[in-house]
Image (cartoon, coloured by chain):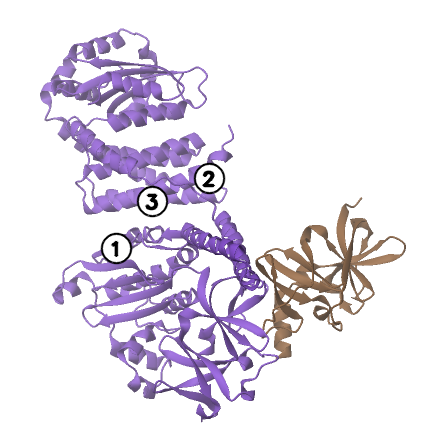
Chain colours: A purple, B brown
Amino acid sequence: MDMNAYLSMFIDESNDHLQSLNENLLRLETEPEDLTIVQNIFRSAHTLKGMSATMGFEDLASLTHEMENVLDLVRNNKLKMDSFIFDVLFKGLDALEAMVQDIVGGGTGKADVTSIVASLQTIMKSDYKAGAAPAAPAPAAAANADALPRTLLLDEFQYSVLKQSIEAGHHVYHIQVALMESCMLKAARAYMVFDLLERQGEIVKSDPSVQDLEQEKFDRFFTIFVISETEGESLQKQITDISEIESASVTLLDEESLMMLEAAAAAGLPQTAAAAAAEESSAAKEQTAATAAPASASKERASSPVSGGGVARTIRVDIERLDTLMNLFSELLIDRVRLEQLASEIKRSDLLETVEHMSRVSSDLQNIVLKLRMVPVDTVFNRFPRMIRDLSKSLDKKIELIITGADTELDRTVIDEIGDPLVHLLRNSVDHGIETTSERIAAGKPETGTIHLRAFHSGNHVFIEVEEDGKGINREKVLATAIKKGIVTQDQAGTLTDQEINMLIFAPGFSTADKISDISGRGVGLDVVRTKITSLGGNVTIDSAQGKGTKFSVQLPLTLSIISAMLIKLGSEKYAIPLSSIVETAIIRKEQILNVHGNKMVEFRNAVIPLVSLSKVLDSPDYNEQDEDETEIVVVRKGDKWAAIMIDDFIGQSEIVLKSLGGYLKNINAISGATILGDGYVALIIDTNALIK
Amino acid sequence: MGEELKVIVFALGSEEYGIEVDKVRTIERLSPITRVPKTASFIKGVINLRGVVVPVIDLRGRFGLTETSATENSRIIVVAVADLEVGFIVDSANDVIDINTDSIDSPPEIVGGIKAKYLRGIAKFGEGRLLIMLNLSEVLNKDEIIQLEQLEV
């Protein structure tokens, strides 16, 4: 079988499962008593194990297997989660992620995991000593079991579980499944049967063992003991509905038949041989929950419709195909504009109607194409809970991360870029924002610090806020540091507003941390954050109240591919200015231009703002505003600084498709990209930020 | 025994040059070029190549030859090297030939005023015709452009 065909599917699904493991483990850490979470974790781990074994990634499968063993004990109430176990499990997850990454990179997914496996096994072993205690309260059953002839089919514990379940009135089935001789993927089919049964109840024992089944170490038959509420006939029907299953015989067991079966097995009937082999390895796999079984079984049923039925039907599409679609669509958009022009020139009503209809369809299409590229910010947010957990552990602070609006959608290109800046901001909040536990208590705050991570839509923008209830920005300290590092002069310092002082922490080379930690404080973080966000066409602001906390607010454009822009003329050349940076347009007379220290300024709305000659900046070959008495200006804004740009003429407002100038023309001053106009000509997009000093 | 190589032949003045066919994406007639300010003088600007914005350079200017005005025969050869896609303005492009890699000799120091490092070699073909094979990655070398820009400033 050609595994490569399944590799990408395997990688995608493994990542999904790893993510869900991560999330659920974190949830479990806050609610250690919730067994349904353990069930979810167990199921993800189990699926992951099955997949990696099928794909031949042995190390991946064996590590998952060890983790699964520990989880199994937990979900069967034989082991209480503690921080040591969480740490080991998280370490295991990291190792799994590394292996999957290795596979993504074309590697074999091999890794040395002996230390983690050893820790997991220690947990297992210490449990077995402790595990004897919970087993003891059922002395009657144990004694009973002791009295029976010891067989190789079921061990003592499994036997007592089954027996107790029967006594408690639950259905216990003995299911024999035969696969078709032609079956190609025996392990997969067996897994499907297991999956089916696990959804309906609790598998107590399988023969051969689950490992052997997964590694296809069996012929065509296997036997399962299962406790389930479902009727036997329905179970049988569901199993035989799985393809390539030849037959399934489901027998309801009562105490007598259970004993008979045991006795028969002991007498050496067919199962015995296989059972003997399976026995030793099954020790770790047994599913014991005498008391937990009915409870968890019903809980599981309650939760399964949520996890199974509520999932939206999706397909995975290569991002490149979406880019191609986008490109093709923008060409269509250009033709549309051209057609509209032609139709208005020709003035034939049926042509106009058709073109109008096409315009409507294409704007619907535009919405859909843009929506296709939208991804929920959750794809970035989902790694943060884990990060905050690890950070707070290493800094010994108590921190709760509250995420809201994770379903807010952003363009894929923005999503890809926004991760690192957010990591920086969050790390900064944990390290500099939130105080240590003792400081918090002294300040009369709750022991646990809270970080809110919010995402929401507003107009054509998406806002992402990182807000903590920490100590807030110490403005005096910030100012002192800024002066010391030469970022502002003593004179300037006096005139700065609170907001401006806050923004100083984004200046390059700024760090107020008293000591450098490995989390932040090297002064390379925040200025990079701001640069990145501005390069995405966004903006970041700070609100801070000393002693109460700090809020970073990141404003991002919804999409990077289509924007509204003002088209302008400069002699024979056409340029586009993004509407988002335009404050106003106006016309000024030559007399209104002021000269301040040799710089041209203009009075605008009671303020004097610099006047920029676009023709000079762009070396315009055939336009000079000095030849005119009246000049059109565009007032643009960068943060709270304004400037007026002199242009030749306005053409109009238009939706334009952003295009890059390609790798050959990078970092051109005052030009941020290009777009293709309705007439097929290329117009350059002006980066107004570069015009404001 | 060398391999057969398919080569696009184009002309700059009286010299004939060659670029391997697999590096060439398309050959276009001259279309309106949008000037990009603050770039080296041989960078003529950008064109709309079926929805993709492609920078165009004048190969004569790139090699330091005198630039001439476009004629009916002028063509833009769009090449793709690594992740760069660039159009070359050439005087004409009208032939595809097969040459044997064995017939490519290493170039002399300077050919027709072009520095040897831009050249891959000289191939003889037909009756005494010489074909100058370009070293595209060197022609598109960005570091050098930055140096050139600094010189101009």
**Which chain does the numbered disc 1 sit on?**
A
Query: In 3D space, how far apart are the residues under numbered discs 2 and 3 (Cα atoms)?
Result: 17 Å
Q: In the image shown, does A269 or B71 lie closer to the viewer?
A: B71
Query: How far across and how far down the image is residue A517, in percent?
Result: 32, 64
Q: Amino acid at mark 1?
A: Thr
In this rendering, does residue A1 appear at all? yes
Quarter of the rendering containing residue A555: bottom left
Query: How far across and how far down the image is residue A13, in percent?
Result: 39, 39
Q: In the image shown, does A142 or A686 lie closer to the viewer?
A: A686
Residue A347 drawn above or below residue B152: above
Residue name at image x 38 percent, y 51 percent: A375
Label 3 sits on residue: A19
Label 1 sits on residue: A404
Q: In the image shown, does A435 or A534 lie closer to the viewer?
A: A534
Q: Amino acid at mark 2?
A: Ser
* Left or right: A530 as drawn, with respect to A434: right
Residue A549 drawn above or below residue A328: below
Query: How far across and how far down the image is residue A590, in percent?
Result: 48, 90
Rendered image: mark on residue A8? 2
Residue B95 drawn above or below residue A441: above
In this rendering, does residue A593 appear at all? no
* Left or right: A166 as drawn, with respect to A49: left
Mark 2 closeness class: few <14, some 14–19, many ≥20 residues within 10 Å: few
* Label 3: element kind: helix
Q: Amino acid at mark 3?
A: Gln
Quarter of the rendering containing residue A199: top left
Mark 1 closeness class: few <14, some 14–19, many ≥20 residues within 10 Å: some
Residue A588 drawn above or below residue A369: below
Q: Residue furthest front?
A: A349
Of callouts 2 and 3, the N-terminal one:
2
